[in-house]
Every structure is written in structure tokens, then in C-alpha cells.
Image (spheres, helix red, strand yellow):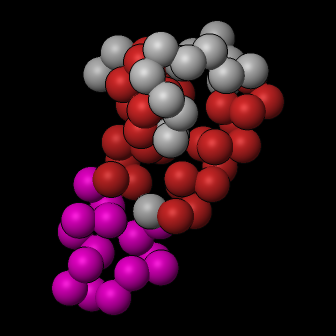
Amino acid sequence: MQGDEARLLLGFPPNSRPSPSQIKAAYRKKVWEWHPDLFPVHEKHSAESKFKLVSIDVPLKLSPVF
């Protein structure tokens, strides 16, 4: 995942350059949106995969912001 992919995952348009505060706000929103504890048992695995993408990969690719 590259920086552009991380920004897309957070809901920003391609080639956008959101501010650090916009990135942090979008990150927090997505983490809560995909938190596995908020999903029924049969959807937990899918939510967990997406949650890991958002909570681990995004900060690594956008590390100067975090």
C-alpha cells in the first residue's frame, strides 16, 4: 500500500493532499467504522481484515502525520 492508497482507504480522492488534521480525523472515523466488535459474528472476519488495514497499514504509509 502506498500513500495514495492509504488516502483512498480513508475516503480522500486520488492525488489529494489532505492536511494532517484531516487525515487524523478520517483515520479515527474509519477505525471506528470497521472495529470488529461492532459487527455480528458472521461479519467479524471481514471487518477485522479491514480494521487491520486501516489501523496498521495506514499509519505506516502516512507516518509523518502519525
Q: Main secondary structure of the magenta part?
A: helix
Q: Is residue 39 above or below residue 33?
A: below
The reply, left or right, for residue 26 in relation to residue 12 is right
Residue in the foreground of this view, choosing between 16 and 47: 16
In which quadrant of the rendered view does residue 25 lie? top right
Image location of residue 20, percent across then percent down: 74, 22
Vertical side of 37 occupied by 35: above or below = above
Q: Please name whichever residue, 9 or 58, is drawn nearer the observer in this view of the structure.
A: 9
Q: Is residue 55 above or below residue 48?
A: above
Counting from the top left corner in percent of width and height, residue 41 is at: 27, 87
Q: What is the span of residues highlighted in magenta in the rendered image?
A: 35-49
46 left or right of 38 in image: left
Which of the 4 image quarters holds residue 26? top right
Residue 18 forms part of the magenta stretch: no
Q: Residue at x 20, y 85 (%)?
A: 42
Frontmost residue, 26 versus 32: 26
Q: How many marks?
A: 0
Q: Position of residue 55 (x, y in %)?
A: 47, 43
Picture coordinates of residue 44, whole percent (x, y): 28, 75
Residue at image coords 63%, 54%: 29
